Image (spheres, grey):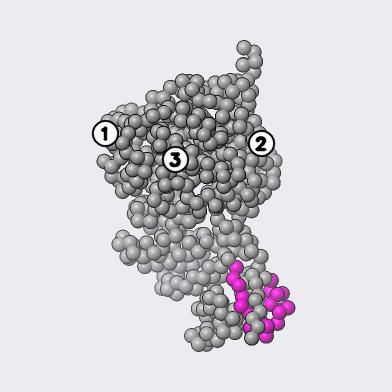
Amino acid sequence: MSASLADIQSAMAKGLLHHKNEELEGFFNGDQEDLTARISVYRNNIFYSLANALADLYPVVQKLVGEEFFRALANRYVRKHPPAQAAMVYFGQDFPVFLAQDKACTDLLYLPDVARFELARQRAYHAADVESLSPQAMQEIGVERLLSSCLSLHPSLQILDSKWAARSIWQAHKTGQPRLEDIDLQDSQQSILIRPAYEVMVCAVDAATLALISAISEGAKLEAAIENTLEQHPELDVPQALALGFGNGFFTGIDIQQD
Amino acid sequence: MNTLLPKSAGIGFKPKHFEDVLSGRFDVSWLEVHPENYMGDGGLPHQNLTRIRESMPLSMHGVGMSLGSADGVDQDHLKRLTALVERYQPTQVSEHLAWSHWNQTFLNDLLPMPYTAESLSVVATNVNSVQEALQRTILVENPSLYLQFEGNEFSEAGFFNLLAEQTGCGLLFDVNNLYVCANNLGLNAQEHLDELRIENIGEVHLAGHSVEILANGSELLIDDHGSSVCDEVWWLYQSLVRRLGDAVPTLIEWDTDTPDFSIMSQEAKKANQAMTSALDLDTAA
């Protein structure tokens, strides 16, 4: 055989992903019709298993567009963004961006945000296990010291700001509440997802709380984070936002800054 | 024999069977998982795997190392596997004779490679890097094939014999895969067993396959792990056990349309019985 193993693998990877059998038929024994059928078994395995992996990650997107449409989307996605890793937990991370650019989805403006919501759930589900600070920790440290601290966020915490009712659409499919027909699609929704133990929790928050948690996540001292947030969101209710955060395990550490 | 697992039937673990596995209602002697399913940082998958590991021997059977890749094993993937092996201390670690990644693209299927001196050198190098990282020998599984390369320089059995000799790895012998290859590529199963150094076998896999009729009317067996083990594979399995002259760790795999755990457990029981009767027959003869 003259072709090296690298030549074979390069040709097979291209030929299988991009439906070009002529690039690989020469490597195998058999007549062309037979080879076409046999090569298809491998190609089908690749596309079928990856579409399944994508459907596992984005079940609500699949429900919204229907299985047949989703399979076609998945095939286009796999050709454009094939996995780079064997662990499927890393696959499909570009799907929300892909949906926003895919021509067949241009009428479904809310679809990329529903996908972002599902991706955030997956990331929260697989994030590292770290114990959260309890609400008592907030009491014990006292307001003054808390203000001059940097708070570290739980590794599972995901911040989602949507121009659409992405959370309600997801909840409608998962729990039946609210009913899909009752949702105002253009209802801008902010959510924080977190998995303090083994179940992912979804917190509906207002834009001001979302901005505060975002500022904390960027490493700002709490006092500075509050000041910055108040400039854009004078309605920020600081005690309520902190109670929500400590009550739901958002924070895992308090680093008191020395001035 | 390169055997560390219990010499009895184990079951391929599915998360939906978690409660059944730990319920004590079924006789399970060991379980096998795909380490790729536990490569997230934390959460329920790790919690459940920890509880399983506490209650029975565990085998980690990789599907993503791509031992046949000419551009080497993916170091990130190897690091993740090493971390899992250190954390869970599985009794056995195994992988496939196949390739899946090329140039940063992972194709998520076990793709075939020719049996040449070049392939042998690539696989041996890759097996050695995995064994070095894990600080233990692994078992390598024979593939199910739908295509036959032109210009093979070795038989499959000859290739595995040399691979084991060069790397010290053992063989995970999938009986269904041998049956699928025999049908799809015209390989003679008994001649294959005659040539194969069966003392390298550390574990056996049993699974079901489906039959696809191609456009030209010929039959192709698809290794879909979606049904019970067929009679011919049970027969081949018993013939292997007689040749081995000893019981062997044997896994029941059922990955597509996986049934209730009670059915999986019945298949495992059937494997234990098949093993016993094959050995009894041997003693009687």
Q: Is residue B100 visible?
A: no
Q: Is residue B130 visible?
A: yes
The alpha-carbon separation of the residues under discs 1 and 2 comes to: 47 Å
Tell me which numbered mark, 3 or 2, is placed earlier along the sequence.
Answer: 2
Give the labeled residue for mark 1: A32
The relative height of residue A216 versus residue B194 in the rendered view (above or below) is below
> Which chain contains the residue that carries disc 1?
A
Comparing A91 with B202, the one in front is B202
The alpha-carbon separation of the residues under discs 1 and 3 comes to: 29 Å
- Secondary structure under the numbered disc 2 in the rendered image: loop
Q: At x 65% / y 75%, what residue is drawn?
A: A254
Are labels 1 and 3 on one chain? no
- Secondary structure under the numbered disc 1 in the rendered image: helix
The relative height of residue A189 versus residue B57 in the rendered view (above or below) is below
Task: Using the rendered view, name the quadrant where residue A200 is placed.
Answer: bottom right
Give the labeled residue for mark 2: B29
The disc placed on residue B122 is 3
For the record, the magenta segment spans: A134-154
